[in-house]
Amino acid sequence: MEVQGSGLFSKLVAITAVATVIYIFYSGISNPASKVPGPWHTKWTGWVAKYYWFIGQRPFYVHALHQRYGPVVRVSPNEVHTTNIDDVRAIYNAKVTFRKSAFYTNLTGPQVLSIFSTTDVDVHRKFRRLLASQLSETSLKQHLPLLNSRINLAIEGMKRETKSQGYTDLFKWAMFTATDVIGTLSFGESFHMLESGKKNQYVEDLEQIGALSRLRVAFPRLLRFAFKYPIVPLFSRAIARGKRLNGYARQSLQRYQDYVDSDPTTLRLTFFTKLFKAEEDGKVSFNDIFSNAQSFIIAGSDTTAISATYTIWSIIQRPQLRQAILKELQALPLGFTETDLRGLPLLSQTIEEALRLYTSIPAALPRVVPAGGAEIGGYWLKEGTVVGTQAYSMHRDPEIFPNPLEFNPSRWENPTKTMKDAFMPFGRGSRVCIGLHLAYMEIRLLVARFLLEFPNARESTREGMSHEDMESTIYFLAPPKGKRCLVEP
């Protein structure tokens, strides 16, 4: 009987295995996405794309697929990417027909409900309605004294560093600047990294938690299990960091709320002052404010620091370009303002070109095909299919940007409508980055001040620094691979 039972079990296992293979095979060939050009294996598995995500090379992998298969490619059984400009306009339109995918929830964790991560259109509209006015160009002008004071500290820090060791880490000081600014405008107080010249515990915890994003996106269920049962030290430490982060953020916000309640007339306004009023009226919860503040810190620090660093690095590689920009800057009056910088054509064009080639978020911004399905690049896709466009490929389309690998600011002298539509360093459509005006302000000011203070700066070779350090390992953000940019005066 045991032998017969064993044989029966083996048969059941074999039948199950065969049925599973048949099901996977049929699902692959019957899925409308199977008709989209792409590697044969992407009809049945997304593990290759996950592998490239895990090693920080996914945008390069997808770009190679575009180069081989064309503007519309299949990267997994249920995911299609496009660089067709009409598709881009349709997917990232203002009507939000294509909603954000679960990628964003996996990236931040299901407990975070913010303007960045929510897939709910109504929730996003509510947050944007409450936050947009504080982040308009007009409102941001009131924070220019803060920006200038922070950048002054960064310049002084870089001067001290170059005096003591002969070089400075541009990326580090750009990160300190952006993080201290967004910390003040989110929590009501600075992290004071510019004063100390080093990261504080909150930012170190934030970076380490962020490093787990590649696991969270690739294996969301596994990560949820691991965090629920943290038997592995890596996850135990991550949970401890998460608790510290939550504690610091909640204490800071609660302290700011107490200030709001006690003396609102002398209080520094933050992006969330209006939300505290909305909380009183029952429109949002304290957790809503907390989640959005956390998201602002992440979105407003690395992205701006990356963009400012690559802009300056690109300029100091090109002596003629640097001299031409310096000529623009030196013609400004003493005490020039951020508004004056906007009027400098070559500086503006150079920033745009740096954002094109060194976008801080070059990976795809995934969306979901709506009910009833949709046509992308001439291929019909069923509802629920993930679609997207990565800025890395869009910005390197030779039909839109001739000689796309050439750093050429002059291409922005008279950009075409197609160039403008294809340019998406801050996303596109209704979910475009709400903080883009702040980012531009910080980038302009930091680039201008750096060039004026260090007019002969060059890339350093100290500590083994080389061009390779400036290559990117990309998960969601694309910082320099070496997490540094050493320059000499």
Image: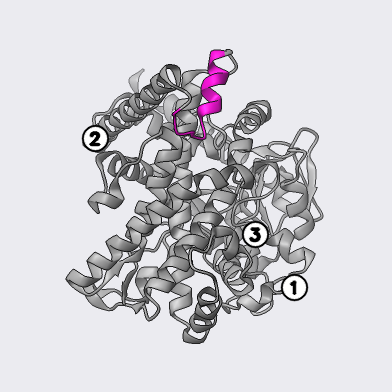
SS for callout 2: helix
Decide: few, some or many residues near mark 2? Use Cα within 10 Å; few <14, some 14-19, many ≥20.
some
Q: Position of residue 55 (x, y in %)?
A: 40, 56
When the figure is inspected, residue 432 is found, relative to residue 422, above or below; the finding is above
SS for callout 1: loop
Tell me the kind of residue under disc 1. Asn
The circle on residue 237 is 2
Residue 273 included in the magenta stretch of the image: yes
Q: CA distance from mark 1 to mark 3?
A: 35 Å
429 left or right, relative to 46 = right
- Closer to viewer: mark 1 or mark 3: 1
Judging depth in this view, the residue of 488 and 485 nearest the camera is: 488
Residue at 34 percent across and 58 percent down: it is 154
Q: Position of residue 215 (x, y in %)?
A: 40, 43
SS for callout 3: loop
Judging depth in this view, the residue of 431 and 154 nearest the camera is: 154
Residue at 49 percent across and 33 percent down: it is 269
Image quadrant in which the C terminus is located: bottom left
Tell me the kind of residue under disc 2. Arg
Residue, disc 1: 414
